[in-house]
Image: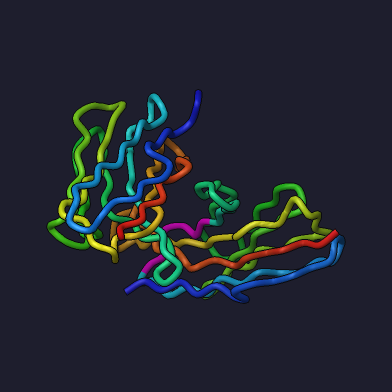
Amino acid sequence: EDQVTQSPEALRLQEGESSSLNCSYTVSGLRGLFWYRQDPGKGPEFLFTLYSAGEEKEKERLKATLTKKESFLHITAPKPEDSATYLCAVGDSGGSNYKLTFGKGTLLTVNP
Amino acid sequence: DAGVIQSPRHEVTEMGQEVTLRCKPISGHDYLFWYRQTMMRGLELLIYFNNNVPIDDSGMPEDRFSAKMPNASFSTLKIQPSEPRDSAVYFCASRRTKAFFGQGTRLTVV
């Protein structure tokens, strides 16, 4: 059974204080690792898809990286508007590409 | 495009009542997904459709849950009878190349 574990559960940063969120996964065959951002009262918003170890994607202050066992979401010089829950999900090549298994997320709070 | 539209945004119902959640996907998207989100279990896929046909419903927790997609622009998720443990936020998402989620329906069964 696919498993996704995100850490930490919650993270408080000061504006400008860079950090990383972790997503550890167990799948029989990775068919994509996905990062989403979720704001309170809203649905998840797609950020990145990574497909193979060594791959990196960047968007503004966010950079996602992937190894064979985990993914990191690096946040550089965060701003208060980066506060949200960040969700990680994996697709298993042994199953449906669309049957994503989600972690429980990391709640990020960036204080001004 | 207005995005994925779900209704109602909030639903409070009594145990044993029938609940119907509605979703209008983004035009042109050929996949539609229903998810449930709780603090305990996080985000779980319940069922998904491709071109209006249910493909995988293995995430549907019990026979009390059913989903339909009569056409490309509308889907429903029905719970009958509802129970307190069904209380959660239910999301609909649609996809062509990447998935877009609706705002969700917060269901409370008392």
Pick the front one: B49 or A28: B49
Per the rendered image, the range of residues in magenta is A29-34
Q: Residue at x 25, y 33 (%)?
A: B51
Left or right: B33 with respect to B20?
right
Quadrant of image for the C terminus of chain A: bottom right
Q: In the depicted view, which residue is nearer to us: A101 or B78?
A: B78
Q: Height in image: A25 above or below A35?
A: below
Task: Give the side of residue A107 with respect to residue B48, left or right.
Answer: right
Name the quadrant containing residue B7: top left
Is residue B76 shown in magenta?
Answer: no
Quadrant the N terminus of chain A occupies? bottom left
Q: Residue at x 33, y 33 (%)?
A: B30
Name the one closer to the observer, A73 or A13: A13
In this rendering, the answer to whether A8 lies above or below B24 is below
Quarter location, residue A83: bottom right
How many numbered discs, if any? 0
| Whole-percent x, y for residue A47 in the image | 59, 49
Q: Position of residue A43 (x, y in %)?
A: 50, 47
Q: Position of residue B109 (x, y in %)?
A: 30, 57
Q: Is residue B41 left or right of residue A7?
A: left
Which residue sits at x=72%, y=54%? A82
In the rendered image of this protein, does residue B71 appear above or below residue A13? Answer: above
Q: Position of residue B2 (x, y in %)?
A: 50, 26
Q: Is residue B67 left or right of residue A97?
A: left
